[in-house]
């Protein structure tokens, strides 16, 4: 359920200290990148106030962001608590809970979108005919095509009675009307062991939408890469990057980077393709790191620590860090990460734990 992230995470975020990472020796030594970070107070206050006063959304994980045609931002969430919090910022044990939702941020005005009704909310996207306690979708990254918001779906099935007893079984794409976030369709993708949708990168120069995915081996996680002509995520055949070439075999993609979390971001930052991710090279790491490459296919190198999460302690862990290039500028990257607890009761006793965190990371002295 909400603690899904033990198997879906093992990777995380943050550190307010300035970080300097050596660059390979050259004839004239380059200055190392300089990193600083601070809490984004505006978004932190906006979402905390909404969670504690609106009586609708009280916390969630994933937190992808996609710009909509009207200038607003769609925040894509997976496991989501709804309802209200009490005067002590606790959640009632009967709080509604769904596996995916969207908040639209229209210049600071937040609106939560779910399926069902306000009185009986359901996930926005559901596996047809399935009991959501047994089979469900979590959201991946999204993109806009025309008047449709396309969101990657990861299908999971319960395998036992434990909170971590579930497994990945398939990929799909949900389509939503950008005006009201109503679901207009779900398109299944070819069978693959890769969890597609960890990140989406739109390349305006070559006409492709690039979709990154994760091969999740629990303790080891590997990034994979696919592409499809822009505007045809649900209608055209995908190509998969394998051993330096593009092919049509959905089971044949090969690893391009080890150590990413299940969710991450890819953007063009300071002249290079940049991956921001939780550090999955360490078990339940609190580090958020950055890799860079000249080509979208990689190689991605120069691992740089951006931040170390202060929340990580005891039962509390952090996971699935990502940058939001649509909400970043200049040397600054807006980065979010998720917070959870191995003790489920903590999420009811303190509703503030299970919410995304928002930080501004500034990186200087980067060479393109």
Image (cartoon, grey):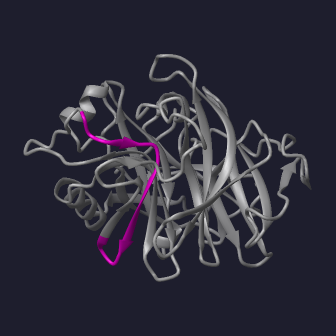
Residue 224 locus on image (x, y percent): 74, 46
Residue 363, placed above or below residue 135: below
Q: Nearer the viewer, residue 160 or 338?
A: 160
Please state which of residues 367 and 294 is positioned toward the viewer in this rendering: 294
Q: Which residue is farthest front?
A: 129
Residue at the left extreme? 87
Question: Camera-side residue: 128 or 280?
Answer: 128
User: Looking at the image, is 314 positioned above or below residue 38?
Assistant: above
Horizontal side, residue 41 vs residue 7: left or right: left
Q: Quadrant of residue 152?
A: bottom right
As for residue 97 lying within the magenta part, the answer is yes
The residue under the point 79% across, 63% down is: 228
Q: Where is residue 213 in the image (x, y as percent from the top left)?
A: 68, 47
Q: Does the magenta stretch include residue 288?
A: no
Q: Is residue 153 above or below residue 343?
A: below
User: Is residue 214 shown to the viewer in this render?
Assistant: no
* Residue 93 in view (yes/no): yes
Q: How many labels does the image show?
A: 0
Quadrant where the N terminus is found in the figure: top left
Q: Residue at x 72, y 40 (%)?
A: 194
Q: From which residue to which does the magenta span run?
A: 94-109
Q: On the rendered structure, is 359 left or right of 245?
A: left
Say above or below: 86 vs 109. Answer: above
**Can you tell which quarter of the image residue 245 is in?**
bottom right
């Amino acid at each position: 359920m909400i603690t899904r992230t033990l198997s879906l995470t093992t990777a995380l975020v943050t550190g307010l200290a300035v970080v300097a990472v050596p660059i390979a020796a050259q004839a004239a030594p380059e200055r190392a990148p300089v990193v600083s970070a601070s809490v984004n107070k505006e978004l932190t206050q906006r979402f905390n106030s909404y969670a504690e006063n609106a009586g609708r959304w009280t916390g969630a994980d994933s937190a992808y962001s996609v710009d909509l045609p009207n200038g607003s931002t769609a925040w894509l969430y997976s496991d989501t608590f709804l309802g209200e919090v009490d005067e002590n910022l606790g959640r009632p044990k009967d709080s509604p809970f769904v596996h995916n939702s969207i908040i639209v941020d229209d210049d600071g005005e937040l609106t939560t979108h779910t399926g069902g009704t306000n009185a009986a909310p359901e996930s926005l996207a559901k596996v047809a005919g399935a009991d959501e306690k047994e089979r469900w979708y979590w959201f991946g990254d999204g993109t806009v095509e025309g008047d449709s918001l396309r969101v990657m779906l990861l299908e999971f099935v319960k395998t036992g009675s434990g909170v971590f007893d579930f497994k990945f079984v398939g990929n799909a794409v949900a389509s939503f009307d950008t005006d009201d976030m109503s679901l207009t369709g779900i398109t299944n993708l070819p069978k693959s062991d890769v969890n597609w949708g960890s990140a989406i990168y739109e390349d305006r120069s070559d006409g492709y939408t690039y979709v990154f995915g994760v091969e999740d081996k629990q303790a080891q996680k590997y990034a994979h890469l696919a592409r499809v002509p822009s505007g045809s995520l649900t209608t055209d055949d995908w190509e998969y990057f394998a051993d330096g070439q593009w092919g049509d075999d959905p089971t044949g993609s090969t690893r391009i980077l080890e150590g990413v979390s299940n969710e991450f971001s890819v953007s063009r930052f300071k002249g290079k393709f940049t991956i921001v991710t939780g550090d999955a090279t360490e078990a339940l790491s609190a580090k958020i790191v950055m890799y860079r490459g000249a080509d979208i296919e990689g190689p991605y190198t120069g691992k740089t620590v951006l931040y170390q999460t202060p929340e990580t302690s005891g039962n509390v862990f952090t996971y699935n860090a990502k940058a939001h290039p649509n909400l970043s500028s200049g040397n600054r990257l807006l980065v979010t990460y998720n917070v959870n607890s191995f003790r489920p009761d903590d999420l009811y006793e303190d509703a503030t734990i299970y919410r995304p965190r928002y930080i501004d990371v500034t990186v200087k002295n980067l060479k393109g």
